[in-house]
């Protein structure tokens, strides 16, 4: 049975987990259909996931060709289009820049706002797999239709894999 996501306890858990500085892997596909992955620092804010990028990277090049990306963190996965929303100092980015500065205490140590190629990337998830390990539940989230449902969770397999790492 599908349940409403917005305002749910599940949304609160997702915000609690990802509404702060997080390390995730982003997968893209190149123009030659070669999958590429990289580790990024990002956060979830008001239905989207944000990170700082640079226009001259392969990541930005890949997103221009195929904007659909996958973000992975542990057992959790988000899929959706990524877009370059421009330089941090653009007037349109004033509000989200304040969120970046609040979320990432080291923001100015690693981001060069004097570089015209520095940009913000916004990923708007269309769907996700979210594991609530504490309660031994896994959810499929459909952001487009604002729904979620519980799905298969195998703690035995998960604990065996965790032992390997």
Image: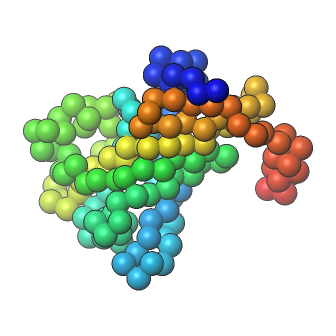
Front residue of this view, candidates 76 and 17: 76
Image quarter where the C terminus lies is: bottom right
- Left or right: 161 in relation to 5: right
Would you identify the image quadrant in which residue 107 lies? top left
Where residue 17 appears, as percent x and y from the top left, is 56, 31
Decide: is 52 above or below 45: below
Decide: is 124 above or below 4: below
Image quarter where the N terminus lies is: top right
Front residue of this view, candidates 84 and 68: 68
Q: Residue furthest left?
A: 91
Q: Residue at x 10, y 39 (%)?
A: 91
Would you identify the image quadrant in which residue 44 lies? top left
Q: How many marks?
A: 0
Where residue 139 appears, as percent x and y from the top left, is 64, 35
Where residue 19 appears, as percent x and y from the top left, is 46, 31
Q: How is the image coloured?
A: rainbow
Q: Residue at x 51, y 22 (%)?
A: 4
Q: Residue at x 60, y 42 (%)?
A: 129
Would you identify the image quadrant in which residue 9 lies? top right
Q: Is residue 85 visible?
A: yes
- Left or right: 3 in relation to 74: left
Q: Is residue 51 visible?
A: no
């Amino acid at each position: 049975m599908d349940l409403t996501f917005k305002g749910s306890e599940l949304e609160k858990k997702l915000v609690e987990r990802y509404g702060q500085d997080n390390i995730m892997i982003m997968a893209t596909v190149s123009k030659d259909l070669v999958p590429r992955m990289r580790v990024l620092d990002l956060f979830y804010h008001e239905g989207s996931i944000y990170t700082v990028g640079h226009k001259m990277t392969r990541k930005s090049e890949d997103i221009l060709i195929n904007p659909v990306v996958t973000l992975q963190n542990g057992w959790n996965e988000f899929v959706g289009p990524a877009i370059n929303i421009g330089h941090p100092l653009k007037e349109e980015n004033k509000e989200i820049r304040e969120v970046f500065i609040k979320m990432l205490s080291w923001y100015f140590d690693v981001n060069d706002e004097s570089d015209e190629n520095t940009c913000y990337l916004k990923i708007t998830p269309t769907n996700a797999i979210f594991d609530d390990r504490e309660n031994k539940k896994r959810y499929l989230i459909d952001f487009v239709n604002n729904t979620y449902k519980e799905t298969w969770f195998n703690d035995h397999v998960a604990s065996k894999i965790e032992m390997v790492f």
